[in-house]
Image (cartoon, coloured by chain):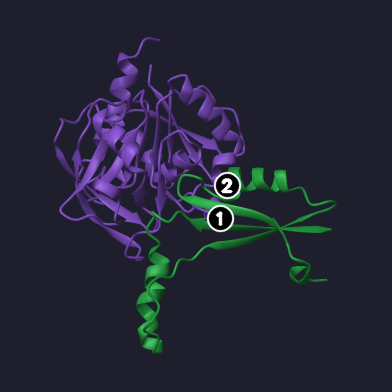
Amino acid sequence: MARVVVDVMLKPEILDPQGQAVVNALPRLGVDDVSSVRIGRRIEIEFVGEADLDRAREIADKLLANPVIEDFEVRLAETEEVRP
Amino acid sequence: MTARVGVVTFPGSLDDGDAARAVRLAGGEAVRLWHADPDLHGVDAVVLPGGFSYGDYLRCGAIARFAPVMESIAAAAAGGLPVLGICNGFQILCEAHLLPGALTRNQHLHFRNRDQVLRIESPATAWTNTFAAGQEILIPVKNGEGCYVADERTLDELEATGRVVARYVGGNPNGSLRDIAGITNAAGNVVGLMPHPEHAVEALTGPSLDGLGFFTSILKHLAGAPA
């Protein structure tokens, strides 16, 4: 079993209303020194055998992210991230 | 012969019955299509109705676009089959790359439903030919992820080539760039529209009868098309 992590984020030029709603709520927590929050999605893929980063990239490009509005990064999970 | 207009049902489609009814009221024959069946059953045009497709778990339309029926529709659309995507159908057409751009969460984060004035910018499509350029119509809008976005180059190209089909008038319900409510592909056979014409086809249930124009347009288009 090998875990690959895919991080999907809206492109910087695309408005993130969810992040904006959070940043607007922060002053109510007493937090005044945060100027921007952007919210993405973390996806964990487990391969049965060896991790295949190229195939993970293809999965991300075709399905997990919409390249029109989102960027993504694909990486092997760090050892401490791999839970039993 | 009566034109046969297919209406696809995906898991989560909720306006498929209304779309089929609109086709019938316009004078066409509505043919129900099932998302898992790749056979288009000889239809002359297809409507992808609104709803909350199972693809919404990831992104609106992202999984629906891999439905077997969508492969057949994409291939037929490339050959000129008229396709109208309404709301979730518009999202599916963008995810399937049959239309450019994408639909994202409404800028204000609220689900918005109201009767909406639109201006028809292009009557030069299979689905809008019974309208006049600049004509204002009133049909319902109801969406949570209806904010149309595309890069500046794509937006400029859509404007320059007359591919913005309809624009919001009197307030933009979702933050769509340049108030875009609907677009078409280069050939004019594939149209995506966020508001719902199928809910404005009868006086009892709609704010107007303006939505009927989209369905009479396709029948007029098919009647004029060579067999």
Q: Examine the rendering and report whether any part of residue A16 can be seen.
A: yes
**Residue under the point 45% across and 54% down:** A11
Screen quadrant of the C terminus of chain A: bottom right
Q: Which chain is green?
A: A
* Dots 1, 2 in contact, CB < 8 A: yes
Marked residue chain, label 1 = B
Few, some or many residues within 10 Å of mark 2 (<14, 14–19, 20+):
some
Q: Using the image, determine if residue B108 lies above or below residue B78.
A: below
Is residue B12 in view from this perspective? no
Three-letter amino acid code at disc 1? Leu
Corner quadrant of residue B219? top left
| Chain drawn in purple | B
Q: Position of residue B131 (x, y in %)?
A: 19, 31
Circle number at residue B58: 1
Q: Residue at x 53, y 25 (%)?
A: B75
x, y (%) of residue B147?
A: 35, 53
Farthest-out residue, bottom: A30
Judge whether B195 appears above or below A82 on screen.
Answer: above
Instruction: Name the residue that disc number 2 marks.
Output: B63
